[in-house]
Image (cartoon, helix red, strand yellow):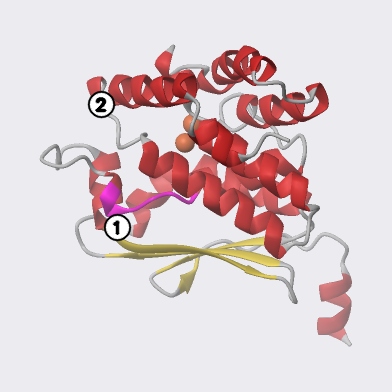
Amino acid sequence: MITLKDIKENNRFSALIDRANKCMEAIGYTEHGIRHCSYVSAISREILVQLEYPERIQELAAIAGYIHDIGNSVNRKNHGPNGACLAFPVLMEIGMDMDEISMITSAIGNHEEETGSVVNEVAAALIIADKSDAHRTRVRRGKYNPEDIHDRVNYAIRKSKVVVDTDNKVIQFSIEMDSTSSIMEFMQIYMSRMIMCEKAARYLECEFQLVANGQPINNQPVIDGSKLDEESA
Ligand SMILES: [Fe+2]
Ligand SMILES: [Fe+2]
């Protein structure tokens, strides 16, 4: 069976990741190379490990995470669906099972907030992993532009972490920001991504919690009314 190791050793995927990262650099975007792909791969897997999904599903999430942004080598716009179409023939060529390929391509094709939806557990894990990669290391060396809100926000984030609390069914994303930017600016560019993470967590039967500088930022709506019953009792 195809594993993440096979994907990492595949020259075609390496070339696509490299091209995608170069294209993002050319249009002034933050780092989208091996570091980002490896982070998203590891966190996608870890979320499903913690939630005890089958091992093979964990592996598919790690693979999807590693190649999720190759569509940026075509165009930033629609890079999810484009990436899925690029991945398809390469995964076919290396002999992956069609059901597994379609699981991966559906996750890649749905990871962006403009056109994506939480279509399965691999997509859900990938969305949370991708949107949580906010950190100062994503600002390209020597390219920090204080006029750019994405650079300011990423540069301000000194620490970021995703923790799965399996007992309470909570996926917590916490960030620590310095005064280079502000939580207000973070929300300005991350609002739709955080809402997508809420949907993804709900698909995994968890609550998504965003914590910035120790402060809870979002509050999930009461879905079944049981919390209200507890409070009024
Ligand atoms: Fe992306
Ligand atoms: Fe990404």
In screen coordinates, is 217 left or right of 151?
right
Q: Is residue 136 magenta?
A: yes
Looking at marks 2 and 1 on the same chain, the residue that comes earlier in the sequence is marked by: 2
The vertical placement of 163 against 75, above or below, is: below
In screen coordinates, is 219 left or right of 1?
left
**Residue 182 — which label?**
1
Q: Magenta segment range?
A: 132-137
The residue most toward the bottom is 233
Please name the residue shown 79% across and 55% down the image.
53
Where does residue 204 sit, x and y in percent of width and height?
76, 53
Figure label count: 2
Let me know if residue 120 appears in the view.
yes
**Residue 26, quarter of the rendered image:** top left
The vertical placement of 61 against 159, above or below, is: above
**Residue 43 — which label?**
none
Q: Amino acid at mark 2?
A: Glu
Please name the residue shown 41% across and 16% down the image.
73
Q: Nearer the viewer, residue 69 or 216?
A: 69
Label 2 SS: helix
Label 1 SS: loop
Foreground mark, 2 or 1? 2
Query: Few, some or many C-alpha atoms within 10 Å of disc 1 (few <14, some 14-19, many ≥20)?
Result: some
Are dots 2 and 1 in contact, CB under 8 Å?
A: no
Q: Amino acid at mark 1?
A: Ser
The vertical placement of 37 against 178, above or below, is: above
The residue most toward the left is 142
Where does residue 166 sit, x and y in percent of width and height?
72, 71
Question: Which quarter shows the N terminus?
Answer: top right
Disc 2 target residue: 25
Let me know if residue 75 appears in the view.
no
